């Protein structure tokens, strides 16, 4: 009994809670990556069999499968993440709902970054035949841009632009995850007031209403950041700064929705199993 209580106490710390929440998501990503590699190899073998294998086939096939991998990984990781909020195995852990929510979101982000890195490695492997061409193209692009751009600020602008794009992508991904959680928890909380006999039907209707409301709010957010995306490849300072402003804007909405999610977890969402 003491050992059990000691283990439960350790689970309350942030880092000890991160490990069990990340492990099942890593298994999901690893299985997807394994299937991805097998699919790439089988497709290449089929191309060889047909006699259609070209120099650019490995890279094209790898990139094409990466799109599917990204979508499937996001859906399955999100499903695992949402299941946690209504699972006895995790909700009964002596940790605050805020900590559970934060660690769960962080674990999802970590495994998606891991999945993205593995896809990048596969791209690099598939692009080996083009290393010489990539090097020449990069040199030409760098020479042209450096010649026509502001030389003293070129490197700084490139670094700021890259960091801004990465941060904006992270902020948009987090907002999407948090919004999905808000839809799920809102629907789960509202169905608690419905009669059991018709709960499935009314739950479907409620989810549709919540999704429509979410899409309306999302359209407002999208309009605010649309100007940034339309000028995405410009190199003037105002657009670079707008990337950071848009990131802060999205993170602000993420924080607000997260407050709502934690409130729903504490007061309205009950476990199903």
Image: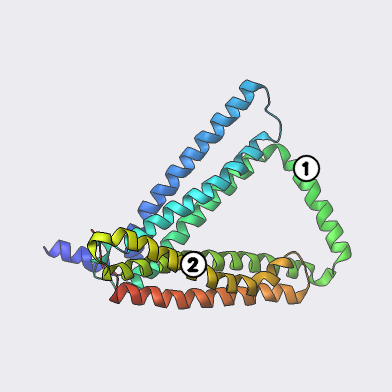
Badge 2 element: helix
Residue linked to disc 2: 212
- How far is disc 1 from disc 2 in space, using C-alphas? 47 Å
- In the image, residue 138 sits, relative to residue 175, either above or below, namely above
Residue 233, picture quadrant: bottom right
Residue 104 visible (yes or no): no
Q: Is residue 140 above or below residue 206?
A: above
The one of 137 and 187 positioned closer to us in this rendering = 187
Q: Total marks drawn?
A: 2
> Residue 62, how many percent across, how many down?
60, 40
> In the picture, which quadrant includes the N terminus?
bottom left
Is 138 displayed left or right of 126 in the figure?
right
Query: Tag 2: Cα neighbours inside 10 Å, few (<14), some, or many (≥20)?
Result: few
Q: Is 16 or 247 nearer to us in this picture?
A: 247
Image quadrant assignment for residue 257: bottom left
Q: Which residue is at a point 43% across and 59% down the rendered structure image?
A: 108
Measuring from the top left, give residue 84's x and y in whole percent. 32, 61
Q: Which residue is mark 1?
A: 133
Residue found 64% across the figure and 72% down from its top: 223
Q: Is residue 6 visible?
A: yes
Q: Position of residue 80 (x, y in %)?
A: 37, 55
Mark 1 or 2: in front is 2
Pick whichever of labels 1 and 2 is earlier in the sequence: 1
- State which quarter of the image contains the C terminus: bottom left
The residue positioned 32% from the left and 64% from the top of the image is 85
- In the image, is residue 128 above or below residue 206? above
Task: Name the quadrant containing residue 166.
Answer: bottom right
**Residue 269 spot, x, y in % from top left:** 29, 70
């Amino acid at each position: 009994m003491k050992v059990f209580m000691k283990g439960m106490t350790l689970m309350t710390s942030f880092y000890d809670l991160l490990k069990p929440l990340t492990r099942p998501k890593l298994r999901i990503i690893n299985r997807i990556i394994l299937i991805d590699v097998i699919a790439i190899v089988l497709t290449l073998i089929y191309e060889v069999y047909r006699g259609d294998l070209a120099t650019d086939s490995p890279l094209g096939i790898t990139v094409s499968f990466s799109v599917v991998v990204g979508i499937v990984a996001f859906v399955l990781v999100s499903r695992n993440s949402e299941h946690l909020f209504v699972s006895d195995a995790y909700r009964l852990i002596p940790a605050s709902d805020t900590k559970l929510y934060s660690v769960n979101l962080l674990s999802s982000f970590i495994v998606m970054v891991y999945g993205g890195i593995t896809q990048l490695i596969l791209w690099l492997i598939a692009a080996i035949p083009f290393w010489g061409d990539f090097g020449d193209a990069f040199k030409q692009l760098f020479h042209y841009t450096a010649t026509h751009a502001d030389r003293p600020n070129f490197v700084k602008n490139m670094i700021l632009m890259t960091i801004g794009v990465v941060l904006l992508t992270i902020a948009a991904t987090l907002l999407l995850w948090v919004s999905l959680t808000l839809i799920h928890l809102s629907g789960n909380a509202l169905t608690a007031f419905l009669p059991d006999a018709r709960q499935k039907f009314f739950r479907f209707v409620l989810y549709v209403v919540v999704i429509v409301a979410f899409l309306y709010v999302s359209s407002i957010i999208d309009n605010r950041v649309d100007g940034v995306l339309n000028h995405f490849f410009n190199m003037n300072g105002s657009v670079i700064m707008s990337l950071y402003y848009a990131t802060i804007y999205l993170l602000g909405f993420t924080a607000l929705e997260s407050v709502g999610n934690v409130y729903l977890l504490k007061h309205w969402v009950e476990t199903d199993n």
